[in-house]
Image (spheres, helix red, strand yellow):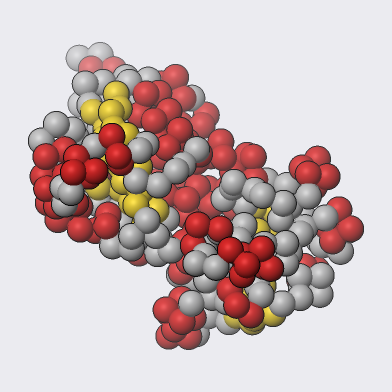
Amino acid sequence: MFFYDLPRPRAEERKKESETTMLKNRNLIAPSDFTLEEIEELLKLSERIIQSPERYADCCKGKLMASLFYEPSTRTKFSFDAAMLRLGGNTLGFSDPNTSSTAKGETIADSARTIGKYVDLIVVRHPKEGTAKLMSRYSGCPVINAGDGGHHHPTQTLTDLLTIRHYKGSFNGLTVGVCGDLKFGRTIHSLVTCLARYENVSFRFISPEELTMPAFVKEELNAKGVPYTETTDLEGTIKDLDVLYMSRVQRERFISEEEYLRLKDYFILTADKMALAKRDMIVMHPLPRINEIATEVDDDPRAAYFEQVRYGMFVRMALILKLLGAQEPA
């Protein structure tokens, strides 16, 4: 028997099989659904895909993903669709719920039961908190939460983690500032509660008094003994940060247009403010940006938000592979 004909040791086979099936048929509704070990495996797979994306071009051949967007989206929808297509699979779905039976009064449960008969995976964004979890109870296939109201956005969190790791190397010991609409910012809620699981991470919550971090996030940090401060002063805080995560004030979450107009320009990150920051601080933003980051900042090497967009596609490729239990190329 030639060397290359020798079977792999059983322990190695079991390890590879375990990595492939680790997240198979699971749902991702909130970042806490995955252990840190599972997140680590996703990030490592994302990095392998970044190195050689062409190797993964047929991994999901014959698989179908439903893309159900009850709210507008550019980056999340495009990156999920691109991820599935780059894996050799196909997508179907809608960006306007009025083109579906939702307009006729069909319930989320019935939609999930129906769509789950056609596809292998469902990605859903909805303005109402808890919708993705409800859909996962009836779909019969894995469900990924692409944002549910002001609650969670777990795949943006995975995107953010991959971005931070690329620029900072590790999560441990970071001082992270989140700035803007902390009350309704689901990307921020997800990121903060996830980063709080790592060692020696501390937070600076920077917001107008009307848009402070919700109690459920602060209660979780308090229970874990994770340090944080709250302030309205971006200029006085930026010098301490390793990561600055900006967010827009979300017009669609406001009942009062007058209140939105009063708060929307409360924080604007400019080149002058960037001059106060550490030389290796990074600036992130889930986008879309309105005017909370001046365009002059885009050319600063610390501006990571457009690379953040690119990493979103790769981490979603890794997630799709894992939930479908697809075999990674040898």
Instruction: Give residue 14's position: percent from left, percent from top.
Output: 20, 42
Say if residue 15 shows up in the picture. no
Q: Give the position of the N terminus as an image quadrant.
A: top left
Rendering quarter of residue 181: bottom right
Q: Quadrant of the C terminus?
A: top left
Q: Is residue 138 above or below residue 77?
A: below
273 left or right of 125 in image: right
The residue at the point 39 percent across, 30 percent down is: 81
- Residue 215 is left or right of residue 2, and the answer is right
* Rendered location of residue 306, percent (x, y): 64, 40
Q: Quadrant of residue 9?
A: top left
Q: Residue at x 46, y 82 (%)?
A: 215
Q: Residue furthest top?
A: 2
Whether residue 306 sits left or right of residue 318 in the image: it is right
Give percent across and percent down for residue 309: 57, 40
Observer able to see residue 69: yes
Q: Which residue occupies 56% across, 59% down?
A: 250
Instruction: Please name whichever residue, 156 or 150, is drawn nearer the observer in this view of the structure.
Output: 150
Residue 212 horizontal side relative to residue 72, left or right: right
Find residue 316 and report its horizontal and vertical position in percent.
41, 39
Taking the spot 31% from the left edge, 57% from the top edge, the residue there is: 29
